[in-house]
Image (spheres, grey):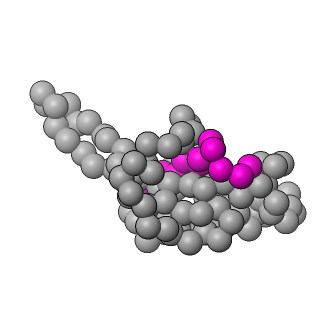
């Protein structure tokens, strides 16, 4: 998080963009955008039943510009750009924001 221009504000705005979805969503950052304000995609989950076992599948639903936090129109191939392998769920983003606020960061 040290590379972000304003980590607390960035995380707060990401959480705000996740809030419209069910709380069972997650976010990934782009590995090819600016490190000071990375683009990010929000994924929702669909559930399926595979031979009696519930399967949880992450589905990309929205992409945001990190600089403006505005959703942008995308073509399906935009989902194919390099996204981080690690995702953070809604509750993890909430916890991170709380920790940043307690630390008094910008």
| Residue positioned 77% across, 55% down in the render | 36
Q: Give how far across and how far down residue 84 sits, in percent.
A: 57, 39
- Give the total of numbered labels: 0
Q: Is residue 13 above or below residue 88?
A: below
User: Residue at horizontal 76%, vertical 63%?
Assistant: 8
Visible residue check, residue 92: no
The structure residue drawn at horizontal position 44% and vertical position 42%, both measured from the top left corner, is: 80
Relative placement, left or right, of 15 versus 46 is right
Q: Main secondary structure of the magenta part?
A: loop
Quick check: 7 above or below 53? below
Answer whether residue 83 is visible to the viewer in this image: yes
Left or right of 73 on screen, residue 35: right
26 drawn magenta: yes
Residue 51: percent from left, percent from top = 12, 27
Return the residue nearer the eye: 22 or 57: 57
Left or right side of 85 for 77: left
x and y percentages locating residue 105 in the rendered image: 86, 61
* 62 sits to left or right of 35: left
Q: Position of residue 7 (x, y in %)?
A: 77, 59
Report the magenta residues as a range.
Answer: 24-35
The answer to if 3 sits in the magenta stretch is no
Query: Within the image, what quadrant is residue 6 found in?
Result: bottom right
Quarter placement of the C terminus: bottom right
Return the residue nearer the eye: 78 or 43: 78
**Which residue appears farthest toward the top when viewing the image?**
51
- Seen at 54% across and 63% down, the residue is 64
């Amino acid at each position: 998080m040290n590379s972000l221009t304003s980590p607390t504000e960035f995380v707060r705005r990401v959480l705000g963009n996740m809030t419209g979805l069910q709380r069972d969503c997650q976010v990934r950052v782009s590995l090819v955008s600016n490190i000071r304000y990375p683009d990010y995609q929000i994924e929702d989950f669909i559930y399926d039943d595979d031979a009696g076992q519930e399967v949880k599948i992450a589905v990309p639903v929205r992409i945001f510009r990190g600089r403006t936090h505005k959703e942008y129109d995308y073509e399906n191939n935009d989902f194919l750009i390099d996204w981080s392998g690690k995702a953070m769920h809604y509750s993890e983003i909430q916890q991170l924001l709380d920790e940043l606020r307690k630390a008094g960061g910008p």
